[in-house]
Image (cartoon, rainbow, N blue to C red):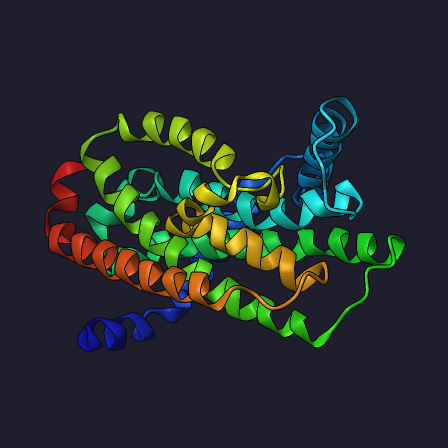
Amino acid sequence: MFKDIVVFLRYKDLLINLTEREIKARYKQSILGYFWVILNPFLQMLVMTFIFSIVMKVPSLGVPYPIFLYVALLPWNFFSNSLSSSMNSLVANSSLITKIYFPREILVYSTVFAKVIDLILAVSILVIFMIIYRIPVSTRILWVPVIFIIQLIFTTGLSLILSTFNLFYRDIQYLVSLMLMLWMYLTPVIYPVEIIPNEYRFILSLNPMAVFVNAYRQVILGGGDPNLNSLIIGVIVSLFVFLAGFSIFKKLEGIFSDVV
């Protein structure tokens, strides 16, 4: 593992270049360009607010539903978009894999890091919402980068696993699309965790994304400190998923060029 880290650091410039390429290629020949990074989650929030708040009357615990939703939607979109894009990162870069030597995981990392940039830009709308709705900012906001790092580890680990399996079995990408749809409804993105009966709430601790989303809401919207027991479980699961994903990826890396 230490040897892999040393090798990876030697290729950090390649990681930066691939991340820049990923961002530029996505919005090439687009009229609005990078503005879509902000516009897309904003429009998504408007549609979902109309459906779930105005039509279905989903409670938001005294917090205006648009910001209640947006706080959870941003980390969820980062997770979902990272998996969807990184899953095809090896297939899409088959020419690089067959011609040039470099740590193949950089292809996955660059895709995930590009989504990190998207997330940072989209946070600007969240800041505007917090000003409009006069959401007070406390020192609990310092929990946000901690929670995000844990989520990033979990997301990257899953991305390594899915990109590897998708290289060998292309049906994976279709199954993942369905899985993400179901996973979102099992995660309290559009609804508060409080509407789930107490006897079933322990199940949420088994869902890392539910832990992360609930923690973001608690520290950003003034609900208190995150549940440390749930967060510790999230850390353990995230590290396990990343180490498992990295191990699987490196074990099969040698035959990638024979498969693409």
Report the front residue among 201 and 38. 201
Quadrant of the image occupied by residue 77: top right
Q: Please state the horizontal and vertical placement of residue 118, each as a whole percent of the image.
A: 60, 51
Q: Is residue 244 visible?
A: yes
Name the residue at the top extreme.
55
Left or right of residue 74: residue 53: right
Q: Is residue 111 visible?
A: no
Please name the residue shown 65% across and 66% down the image: 224
Left or right of residue 194: residue 255: left
Q: Please state the horizontal and vertical placement of residue 11, each as a whole percent of the image.
A: 33, 69
Please name the residue shown 65% across and 44% down the image: 37
Quarter the N terminus occupies: bottom left
Quadrant of the image occupied by residue 92: top left
Please name the residue shown 24% across and 54% down the image: 245
Q: Please state the horizontal and vertical placement of residue 176, each as a whole percent of the image.
A: 36, 32
Q: Please state the horizontal and vertical placement of residue 71, each as a whole percent of the image.
A: 66, 51
Please name the residue shown 74% across and 32% down the image: 49
Report the front residue among 62 and 220. 62
Left or right of residue 5: residue 138: right
